[in-house]
Amino acid sequence: MEEYSEIEEFELRLNVSAKGFLKETAKWACFLSILGYIGIVFIVLAAIFAGAVFAFIGNLSREMNNFGAMGGSFISALYLIIAVFYFFPVYYLNKFASKAKIALRDNDSKSLTASFEYLKSHYKFMGIMALIVLSLYALIMIFAVISVLTAGLR
C-alpha cells in the first residue's frame, strides 16, 4: 500500500479567472499549433522543391551536375529532418489545447491533467532543443576561433 504525502492529497481548484486564462491559453495554443502544422507542410514542400531545383541547376552546367544531385538530396533530407523535429512540439501543443478545452467543457480533472502533461512535454522538448542549438552555436564559435588562430599562425 502506497502512502501519499499531504501535497499529493491536496486537490487544486481553479477559480473563474484561472479557468478563463486557461481557456484563452488553450485557444491560442490551438491557433499556434495549426500554424505549426501549416509550417510543417511548407517545410516538406520546400524539401521536395529543393531537390528539384538543385537537380535543375545541376542539369544547366556539366560542372555542377554532381553538386546539383548531391546538394538537392542533402537539402531535401535536411528539410525533412527539420520537419520531423518541428512536428513534435507542435503535436504536444495541439494535444494540450484539445485536452484543456475538453477539461474545461466537461469539468474533467483527468483531461486537465493530461493537458498539462502535454504542455510539460512541449516545454521539455523545446528546452532540450534550445540546449542542443546553444551547444552547436558554442561548438561553431570554438571552431571558428581555432580556425582564425591557426590561420593567423601560418
Image (cartoon, rainbow, N blue to C red):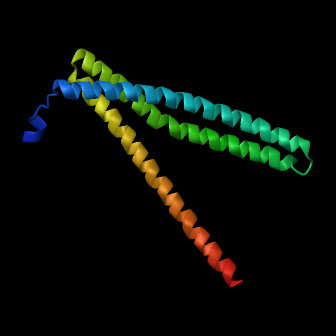
Where is residue 50 drawn, in percent x and y?
Answer: 73, 38
Q: Quadrant of residue 118?
A: top left
Q: Quadrant of residue 58?
A: top right
Residue at 55%, 69% (x, y): give it. 142
Where is residue 107 drawn, in percent x and y?
Answer: 21, 18
Q: Is residue 139 left or right of residue 111?
A: right
Most extreme residue toward the top, as rendered? 106
Residue 154, placed above or below residue 58: below
- Quadrant where the N terminus sits is top left
Visible residue check, residue 20: yes
Where is residue 18 drawn, in percent x and y?
Answer: 21, 29
Q: What is the tally of numbered marks visible in this picture?
A: 0
Residue 121, placed above or below residue 145: above
Residue at 41%, 33% (x, y): give it. 92
- In front of the other: 34 or 63: 34
- Quadrant where the C terminus sits is bottom right
Where is residue 149 drawn, in percent x and y?
Answer: 62, 78
Visible residue check, residue 3: no
Most extreme residue toward the bottom, as rendered? 153
Residue at 20%, 27% (x, y): give it. 17
Most extreme residue toward the right, as rendered? 62
- In front of the other: 127 or 70: 127
Residue at 57%, 37% (x, y): give it. 83
